[in-house]
Amino acid sequence: MLILNLGDALAAFTWLGRLQNVSLEGLLERRRVEVKASSFCIKCSGVQPADCLRVLRELASEPSPENPLLDLPVEKVVDLGPHFKLLHEEQQRQARGDWFQLAALRKYIGGLEGHRIVDTLF
């Protein structure tokens, strides 16, 4: 994993795509990590670059984390179809949560063999 040391923050490049990174954002926020997801990376404050991979591995080892997408506006990231707005509130919540792919995140994190930290000049 490529990690850019931004001084007071870091950018961990996952190349997972926006939706999977939004899932990571939700999981990390529950651990009180300040994080913002984008399409190619997650930007974190409060985590040292050398600890980033350990924190992700801890996430992957949780037995069954609560679905981070249930209450996030997933419909702003992916097209949930023309009938999404016709669903009741609880059905919309469930439809958002259906996009959470814990097995894929665990497989990705489990496959990370290491990281490379690059210090920036900013």
Image (spheres, rainbow, N blue to C red):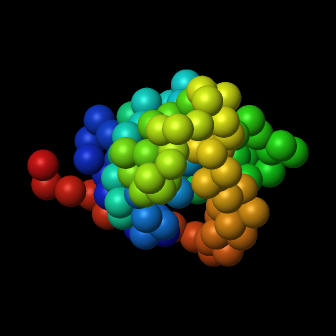
On the image, the x and y values in percent for residue 59 come to 70, 46
- The quarter of the displayed image where residue 62 is located: top right
Residue displayed at 76% across by 39% down? 65
**Rendering coords of residue 104 (x, y %):** 68, 66
Q: Tell how many labels.
A: 0
Residue 40 falls in which quadrant of the image? bottom left
| Residue at 20% in and 56% down | 120
Depth order, front residue of 86/77: 86
- Res 58 visible: yes
Identify the residue at image location x=35%, y=60%. 39
- On the rendered structure, is 79 left or right of 27? left
Toward the right, the furthest residue is: 63
Q: Of 30 and 111, which appears nearest the observer?
A: 30
Q: Residue furthest left?
A: 122
* Residue 25 visible: no
Q: Locate residue 51, reporting x and y percent.
A: 55, 47
Above/below status of 98 relative to 115: above
Q: Nearer the viewer, residue 75 or 111?
A: 75
